Image: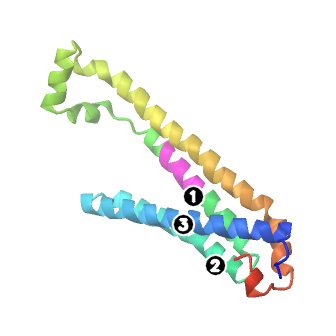
Amino acid sequence: MTAPAPTPPQKALKRVTGLSRINGWSVVLVAGLGGLVALAMGDWLSVGLGLLVGGLGWLEVHGHRLLRKRDVTGMKWLIRSQMLLLGLILAYCASRLGSFDAENMLSNLTPDMEAMLKEAGLNRADIVPLVHQMFLALYISVALASIIYQGGLALYYRSKIQLVTEALTMPPVPPSQSVF
């Protein structure tokens, strides 16, 4: 005897729970590792940011767990976690974009780097525009990637609210046919 094919709401629930589990734990893991590296370097601001990002990943894990308990409010937690993470990343990028310090960058040049510049016929001031462009490109790219990924994931979760709600209000299926 074969199990009946899952309905579209059951498929949506399975996709949302799988995605939220993987994404939530990935954010928690990456933020935790980043926080540990920052702690080893003595960078307390980055430790705090790592804890904050890890907490936002935990919100997604919490939303996933609510869905596993057949509680539709888990969808709100999933959407909220993505929007808050997006806001944090954009605020961080904006703060970094406004903080380029050419003097500090030049003071970090090693003697070997300065020797390489002399060999290339460049002086210290010649590299400032290039480094500034790379700095801008990096943080603008991170902001755009976050808008696409976190924003897209929040929109995806939002688009699945109705189907997930239908799946969670259906009578529970036997364990052999569970979407989890």
Report whether 115 appears left or right of 179: left
Place residue 17 in its image quadrant: bottom right
Type of residue at label 3?
Answer: Gly
Real-space CA distance between mark 3 and mark 2, rounded to the nearest whole angstrom: 13 Å
Magenta region: 86-94
Residue type indicated by callout 1:
Leu
Please say if the residues under marks 1 and 3 sit with CB atoms less than 8 Å apart: yes
Callout in the foreground (3, 2): 2
Q: Residues within 10 Å of mark 1 (few under 14, many from 20)?
A: many
Disc sitting over residue 57 in the figure: 3
Residues packed near mark 2 inside 10 Å, few (<14), some (14 to 19) or many (20 plus)? some
- Look at the numbered discs 1 and 2 and tell me whether their residues touch, using CB distance below 8 Å: no
Kind of residue at disc 2: Arg
Instruction: Mark 1 vs mark 3: give the one in front.
Output: 3
- The residue singled out by tag 2 in the image is 65
Task: Name which of mark 1 and mark 3 comes first in the sequence.
Answer: 3
Q: CA distance from mark 1 to mark 3?
A: 8 Å
Which residue is tagged 1? 85
Residue 78 at what x, y percent from top left?
A: 66, 66
Quick one: 6 or 75, which is closer to the camera? Answer: 6
Task: State the SS at label 2.
Answer: helix
Q: Nearer the viewer, residue 110 or 16?
A: 16
Q: Residue at x 73, y 61 (%)?
A: 157
Towards the viewer: 116 or 180: 180
Asked which secondary structure carries label 3, the reply is helix
In-image side of 154 versus 168 (left or right) = left
Q: Is residue 164 magenta?
A: no
